[in-house]
Image (tube, rainbow, N blue to C red):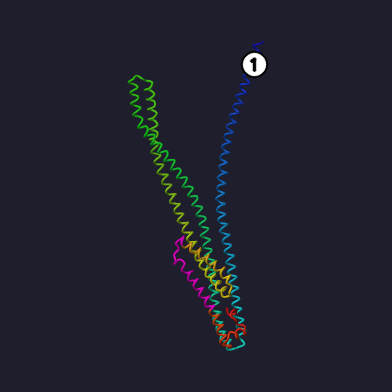
Amino acid sequence: TLTEERDATKAKHDSMVVDLEELMAQVKAKEAEIADVAATLTQQDQAIADAAAKFDRQMNIFRETRAGAEQEQAELMQRREDARQRELAQEELVKSHQERMRRLSENQEVCAAEAERLEAAAATAQKVQEAAAAIRIKKAGLSAEEKRSGDQLVALRAQIADRRAAESETRAALEKVQAAIQNAKSVISEADARLPELEAEKKTAAAAKNFKEAARLAAESKALSSSREGSESSLGALEVQEREVRAALEEKSQGVVGLEKQAFAIARMGSVARCKWLLLASAEKRELVDAAAAAENYEGAEHIQNEVDLYQGELNKLVSEYEILPSELADEARNEEVAAGQAQDLSADSSEATAAAVDTDTGTPEAAADSGIGTEGAA
């Protein structure tokens, strides 16, 4: 019958409604899951971005450290080459003296005089070698001190960068609190100006029996009063918060200033060590310049002198930048003068030995040449 068909249709309709409600519930559940997954994805993206920023900072520190290590390695290779050149020069000098002694041994009187002079020259050479060894040890210690200062400076600069980031965050928080305070004061100020106007307008509307307008104005006045009270109640807490954040900002700023002063002090300490190293290295280079000039290797002497000029330029720059006092470099300056004086004494002893050989043998340079002692051998 129609009634039964209607009942069947009604039952089918009710079943479909139930199914639809279940499907809607499932859709809502899925939408909630999707929202949770999206929030998690956002957090993961932020974590990846933070990790990438941290990695970039670490890579920058690594690059700076590697550049410093490469520079130190290059300087070490140069120092080794300089030491090898000095050793070769000393060997040549010793060989020259030995040859002179062998040739002069044929004449006992000349040999005795020459032996005495050679003994003095050997003593001077020994002093030069000892001074050079002491300078090498001193330079190694200064390089180590400079490296320690550099390592400490890298770590301090990383701390300064972190402190500056925290300082910027605190400054942003302070600006936010100050904006909230200004907003609260603006609300209070505007309410103080508007409330008397609303009260007057309300009385005027009531006197004119415009009760609808009077009710609207009363509601506006009530809402404005409530807003003012809320702003006034939050203003005190905001001002306390501002003082706390400002104090934290000052503390962090002072911490950054302290670290920067400490970094400058460490950089200056390393620069003092570098200046001392430059003074010692300049003394060694000047010895090589004199030796090359004496051998008439003027091109080599000019090349080495250019290195000395570079050392001097770097030294002047560091002294000016860090206001390094002469008294701080006095020991190395004296070492440089002593090394130069000893090298000059050694050269003078060699010249005197040549002159003595000429006078004792025949009194002529030609005779000295015949005996195997020429100006080049003396040098």
Magenta stretch prevailing secondary structure: helix
Q: Residue at x 60, y 28 (%)?
A: 27
| Horizontal side of residue 109 vs 315, given as left or right | right
Residue 347, by quadrant, is bottom right
Quarter of the image for the N terminus: give it.
Answer: top right
Please, is residue 186 above or below residue 148 in the view? above
Residue 87, by quadrant, is bottom right
Q: Residue at x 55, y 53 (%)?
A: 61
Q: Measuring from the top left, give residue 22's x and y in whole percent.
A: 61, 25
Q: Measuring from the top left, give residue 341's x and y in whole percent.
A: 50, 75
Please, is residue 123 above or below residue 268 in the view? below
Residue 124, by quadrant, is bottom right
Q: Residue at x 56, y 40 (%)?
A: 43
**Front position in the image: 305 or 22:** 305
Q: Measuring from the top left, give residue 321's x and y in whole percent.
A: 46, 60
Mark 1: amino acid:
Thr
Please, is residue 203 above or below residue 248 in the view? above
Please, is residue 215 above or below residue 116 in the view? above
Q: Which residue is mark 1?
A: 9
Q: Measuring from the top left, give residue 379's x and y in whole percent.
A: 57, 78
Q: Residue at x 39, y 27 (%)?
A: 220
Within 10 angstroms of label 1, few (less than 14), some, or many (20 or more) residues?
few
| Horizontal side of residue 170 vs 137, given as left or right | left
**Front position in the image: 125 or 240:** 125
327 inside magenta stretch:
yes
What span is colored magenta in the figure? 320-347
**Front position in the image: 115 or 315:** 315
8 inside magenta stretch:
no
